[in-house]
Amino acid sequence: MLSKRILDIVLSILITVILSPLFLLVAILIKLTSKGPVFFRHTRVGKAEVSFQMWKFRTMTHGVDQLGPGLTEDGDSRITGVGKLLRRFSLDELPQLLNVILGEMSLVGPRPEIPEIVQTYSLRQKKALSIRPGITGLSQINGRDDLPIAVKLNFEVEYVRSVSMGLDFKILLKTIPAIINARGNRY
């Protein structure tokens, strides 16, 4: 959908410009409070099962990813003090705007998963991989990580079946209160 892609690019650039002072502040806080890079890149599976590097602000102790993909739990000791704040308000996700600009992601769509989880998808669940993954989506506004993977994937497949600009705007609006109440965030 060309109009969705144009909107993704325009809004991502606009949000990045408006929030650039916040990006700078977050980068400084990460560097001042923990060793390691400001950004964290992680392999995710996107549209047509093509892998890409998803960008995030680093919220965990540097090098913890070498231990494997282990799922994050509430109160996870690997999360830095600044990381807890970033995760609480989903600020760690902001660098994914770069993934949107590059065409690897969309503002709204199914959340991209790690390859190990995608390998377990059923044929029906693989429908979530037929469009660009999103920074936010139905599973994000309906419970995020509080949901079992099968329930999250039901939301992702439902989104693919119902995708429209109207649904995208509704999801974007519902993302704001979802971020504020932090339901399903792990920090």
Image (cartoon, rainbow, N blue to C red):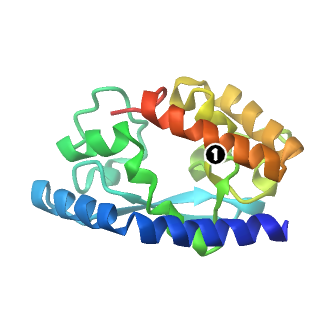
Q: Residue most toward the right?
A: 161
> Measuring 42% from the left and 44% from the top, which residue is drawn there?
90
Give amino acid for label 1.
Answer: Leu
Left or right placement of residue 2 versus residue 114 in this view: right
> Measuring 16% from the left and 63% from the top, which residue is drawn there?
31
Location of residue 159 in the rendering, given as x and y in whole percent from the top left corner:
79, 41
Nearer to the camera, 75 or 87: 87
In this rendering, the answer to whether 98 lies above or below 162 is: below
Location of residue 52 in the rendering, given as x and y in whole percent from the top left corner:
58, 67
> Tag 1, which secondary structure?
helix
Location of residue 65 in the rendering, given as x and y in whole percent from the top left corner:
34, 52
Q: Residue most toward the bottom?
A: 102
Which residue lies under the disc numbered 1? 172
Location of residue 16 in the rendering, given as x and y in whole percent from the top left corner:
46, 68
If the image is split into quadrants, where does the C terminus sit? top left
> Measuring 60% from the left and 52% from the top, which residue is drawn there?
115
Asked where in the image residue 172 lies, by quadrant, the reply is top right
Q: Residue most toward the left?
A: 32
